[in-house]
Image: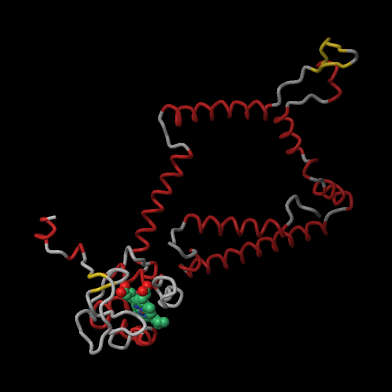
């Protein structure tokens, strides 16, 4: 006995339809609903179990019925259940309604008296599937025209630009909360003793060989004075440590070895060394660096 849809298709389809509907309709945040609500998983199991039980029952009943039929009835039943989809009445009716085609026997009624060197023309109905598609297009065009040309909804380019603008805002937001996305534009000076201690540890592991433990300078310049070759202040120092000094001077770029937060810590530590005046420090190099933003308001006003 063949059924139109075999059981190994029917059961999974029903099960996954119910499963999909649950995931779709139950709001469970970023986790799948069946993980968030264990009761759902239980329900799904029970559902699957019942589904299989029903199928087994039906096929058992079918088998019993089949066995008590006479040979004649069996043959009838086989004929009825063994036909393919395209042979069913239902399918034939549907096709007839969609195409409105005339059976080939009636062709004589449709024949027009046009005859082009033996090529003849039939006066068939327009197939309804095509006609309704056409009406659909007309309605769509109307809606489209009003929405985009008259009411002025966003076209694709506007939609794209809005999304890009929103994405930029989102990225800025993300950078604020993700410290390792920090760069010289967003870095801020740390002053907490515990933060400076972390900076000191990084300095002692990586920088003392050239800048001396007290920052007085050796191969590298003095980091405790007011003079900076490459600019002072947290932003410039962050930039120097990330990207290195001038070519051939010996100060490498540290961004491959240190995370942005680590560079922030060590830069803050260096700034905290200012004015410590270590013994035998290297002579100042570069210019005295004045932080524009740290000037007293009066000075700024004078300029
Ligand atoms: C191999 C030696 C060496 C090491 C190691 C080294 N530096 Fe330097 N550093 C230099 C030299 C040389 C310069 C001068 C660069 C220039 O003149 O362009 C410099 C410059 C600097 C400057 C800029 C100073 C100014 O006056 O503008 C800072 C800040 C700095 N180093 C921080 C660090 C930090 C932090 C570390 C450790 C993570 C470090 N350095 C490791 C050699 C070194």
Where does the image place residue 191, in percent across and percent down from the top left?
Answer: 23, 77
| Visible residue check, residue 262 | no
Residue at 40%, 30% in the rendered image: 151
Apparent side of residue 169 relative to residue 277 in the rendered image (left or right): right
Q: Is residue 111 above or below residue 283?
A: above
Q: Quadrant of the C terminus?
A: bottom left
Q: Nearer the viewer, residue 96 or 28?
A: 28
Q: Nearer the viewer, residue 219 or 199?
A: 219
Q: Is residue 121 above or below residue 2?
A: above
Q: Quadrant of the N terminus?
A: bottom right
Residue at 47%, 65% in the rendered image: 31
Where does the image place residue 90, in percent across and percent down from the top left?
Answer: 73, 38
Q: Is residue 138 above or below residue 117?
A: below
| Visible residue check, residue 199 | yes
Q: Nearer the viewer, residue 275 or 169?
A: 275
Q: How many badges with numbers are in the image?
A: 0
Where does the image place residue 47, in percent across and percent down from the top left?
Answer: 58, 63
Which quarter of the frame holds ligand 1? bottom left
The quarter of the picture where residue 205 lies is bottom left
Q: Nearer the viewer, residue 37 or 168?
A: 168
């Amino acid at each position: 006995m063949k059924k139109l849809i075999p059981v190994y298709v029917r059961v999974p389809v029903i099960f996954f339809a119910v499963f999909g509907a649950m995931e779709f309709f139950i709001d469970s945040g970023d986790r799948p609903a069946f993980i968030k609500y264990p009761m759902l998983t239980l329900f799904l199991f029970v559902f699957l179990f019942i589904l299989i039980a029903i199928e087994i029952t039906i096929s058992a009943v079918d088998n019993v019925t089949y066995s008590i039929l006479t040979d004649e009835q069996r043959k009838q039943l086989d004929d009825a259940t063994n036909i393919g989809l395209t042979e069913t009445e239902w399918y034939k009716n549907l096709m007839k309604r969609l195409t409105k085609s005339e059976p080939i026997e009636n062709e004589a009624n449709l024949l027009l008296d046009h005859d082009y060197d033996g090529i003849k023309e039939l006066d068939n109905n327009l197939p309804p599937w095509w006609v309704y598609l056409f009406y659909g297009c007309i309605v769509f065009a109307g809606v489209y025209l009003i929405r985009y040309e008259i009411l002025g909804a966003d076209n694709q380019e506007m939609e794209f630009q809005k999304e890009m603008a929103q994405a930029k805002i989102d990225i800025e937001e993300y950078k604020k909360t993700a410290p390792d996305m920090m760069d010289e534009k967003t870095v801020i000076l740390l002053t907490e003793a515990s933060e400076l201690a972390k900076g000191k540890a990084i300095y002692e592991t990586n920088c003392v060989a050239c800048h001396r433990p007290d920052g007085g300078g050796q191969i590298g310049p003095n980091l405790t004075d007011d003079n900076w070759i490459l600019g002072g202040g947290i932003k410039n120092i962050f930039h120097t440590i990330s990207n290195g000094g001038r070519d051939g001077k010996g100060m490498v770029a540290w961004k491959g070895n240190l995370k942005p937060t680590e560079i922030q810590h060590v830069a803050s530590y260096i700034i905290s060394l200012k004015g410590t005046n270590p013994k035998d420090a290297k002579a100042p190099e570069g210019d005295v660096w004045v932080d524009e933003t740290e000037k007293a308001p009066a000075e700024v006003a004078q300029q």
